[in-house]
Amino acid sequence: MYEQSLYEIIEPVKRTTISRLNKGKKWKRGYNKEHDVVVLSSTGQIGEIYNIQGLHIALPKVPKDIHSNKNKKWEQLEKPDVLKKIKTIFDWKAYPEEQKEQWHEYIDEEFNRREEGFWFNNNGKPTYITGTHYMYLQWSKIDVGAPDFREANRLFFIFWEACKVDSRCYGMCYLKNRRSGFSFMSSAETVNLATISSDSRYGILSKSGADAKKMFTDKVVPISINYPFFFKPIQDGMDRPKSELAYRVPASKFTRKKIDTNEKLEEIKGLDTTIDWKNTGDNSYDGEKLSLLVHDESGKWERPDNILNNWRVTKTCLRLGSRIIGKCMMGSTSNALDKGGDNFKKLYNDSDVTKRNKNGQTKSGLYSLFIPMEWNFEGFIDEFGQPVFRTPDEGCYGPDGELIDIGVVDHWQNEVDGLKDDQDGLNEFYRQFPRTTEHAFRDETKNSIFNLVKIYEQIDYNEGIGSSAVVNTGNFQWVNGVKDSKVIFYPDPKGRFKISWVPPAHLQNRVIVKNGIKYPGNEHMGAFGCDSYDISGTVDGRGSNGSLHGLTKFSMEDAPANAFFLEYVARPQTAEMFFEDVLMACVFYGMPILAENNKPRLLYYIRRRGYRGFSMNRPDKVWNKLSVAEKEIGGIPNSSEDIKQAHAAAIEMYIQSHVGHLGDGRYGSLYFNETLNDWAKFDINKRTKFDAAISSGLAIMACNRHLYAPNAKVEKPKINLSIAKYDNKGGASRIIEN
């Protein structure tokens, strides 16, 4: 069965505390710092608390009376025929006065639902939708008419509402699948906010100016036109404008306030609110104050346009000093990484709500949200708005009564199986309909230095088995804090190490002391590769990570053969913390390390601590050919062209033999997708960008050092291990001939 993981109901606040504050109606809408929850309720009372991708969101308390119909599902509420005929406030003014009064309560109730949200009975369960979601379902017209209720959209709008009321947040960065409805939902929200705001500006950007204009004319304007008169302010200019929608007189003045019939129209102060669109560019909306910026297709900005640069500029349009006065609603699928997708990926990763600065903000200021395609794929949503994940045992029907006889996961897998012989086609399908963020940012395979077909086979296998069940996250520490004693591993979800294998107790901490120097006791079992750094901090704070990989050899011990068992890609606060992490891992596993010696502080650190025996010498030279520094600390240079080629060839060799589908239904045992993705993007001419590739390649070289050993009698001037390039089109990778 499919395991739902999109959200969970949590209890971060004691029930007694909730009851006490509910009794006094003390919960204020917005971010509650004391309890670390974002409160959506306007009544002072809260109910369930959702955890959506790390953001804790408190929903309103379930009311005594909730709306229910005979079908116990979402259906648009009846709209009075009389009011349908009233198109403008001027028509309302002309309506007989004695008949107006009967509709005041109805109109007020619609405004309340717009502000506070709406509860309805959905298949026997009280279900809450935000006011924005209600306006979308009840009053927004889209290309197919009335929108369907979908659970995925309910969670989307709840997350968005939390972004709106959270004073720390600039908005959302939504990673989506195609046809998820984001363009219509964001258009509906634009109209919803603009029609209740005064002296405000609302902007639209897309992957091109033409796309932004189309969104404005085909979505925003029709939604505005179809609003009922009591929600629709007086519009300035054309009924169907091409560039700007301007609202002047607010409808609320005529409805909720129930103004005197003798009051003159001219005395009503206008909204002076506009919605417009801009051409795509880094400086779009530069210097303008915005209440809402809709960023559609932000993952498809192709060079020279850069979504990162644009966001740095437009972010300032949403604040006055330190106060956030506007929000950004950003959503997109992703292009291939070299076609702008890499910028959107960085922006998405910088929006992780679990990683905040001292001001409580994410690096980008946005909050990231990813909803897997199986939650919101057209044709696989039942009549109650729930996704049909697996093929149902009995009849299951969609909102229009159509039979759903196959689950979305099975349907998706059938599509994937049909594209196995077209890797680029498969990767495009993954990007359009991702089930994981890995799928969403899947890159193209053309002319890669490595066999990406096998790499992606391994990534897909890891995701299919749920590599998190195989990989443990945590840290190492000295027993009782006593350095140079014994090392233990302790699980920690925020730990820097990922490990897939731990040696039996009798093989742990095997250190041999010779002449006062410590040597690894399990050298026959495997080795580490390391890409180090020397400086704790950099001026821009964007220094590369330290990286460490552990790899086993074939041995007679109780250990998996030729398997990567450890991945470490992190940059602790100080370089010394990184050095200590590396040392503890080496001691725990009792294995040597091969590290680049152009950044020698790590190797000097190891030597000073008495562990010179753990630091491997470069395998391509005999002892008497080593330099003085190499004899002192060990290590291997990264400047030699021969070494660069040998390093890349080592990875290539490992991929061919131990990664992806190995035949007979067997797959490789490299469970670290960060490493695999680094290999996928590896550029031999820009090696410094690929920390994981450097350290993993060194681990392979360390475990196969005999391949690089010079002839004892005649030293070879070069290591002739040239690396092939692969054309990954079609079902099989082919070597590109020179």
Image (cartoon, rainbow, N blue to C red):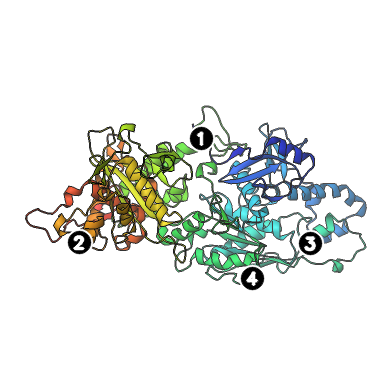
- Quarter holding residue 715: bottom left
Q: Residue 650 at what x, y percent from top left?
A: 24, 51
The residue that label 1 is drawn on is 3
Q: Residue 455 at what x, y percent from top left?
A: 33, 47
Of the residues under marks 2 and 1, which one precedes in the sequence?
A: 1
- Quarter holding residue 512: top left
Determine the CA span between mark 3 and mark 1: 47 Å
Determine the CA span between mark 4 and mark 2: 61 Å
Q: Nearer the viewer, mark 4 or mark 3?
A: 4
Q: Residues within 10 Å of mark 4 (few under 14, many from 20)?
A: few
Regarding residue 40, the answer to whether it shows in the image is yes
Determine the CA span between mark 4 and mark 3: 23 Å
Q: Nearer the viewer, residue 97 or 657?
A: 657
Could you tell whether 591 is left or right of 442 in the image? left
Q: Residue 378 at what x, y percent from top left?
A: 54, 44
Is the residue 526 above or below the residue 241 in the image?
above
Labelled disc at residue 627 = 2
SS of the residue under disc 1: loop
The residue that label 4 is drawn on is 288
Q: Residue at x 26, y 54 (%)?
A: 726
Of the residues under marks 4 and 1, which one precedes in the sequence?
A: 1
SS of the residue under disc 2: loop
SS of the residue under disc 3: loop
Q: Residues within 10 Å of mark 2 (few under 14, many from 20)?
A: few
Furthest residue in direction top, as rendered = 394
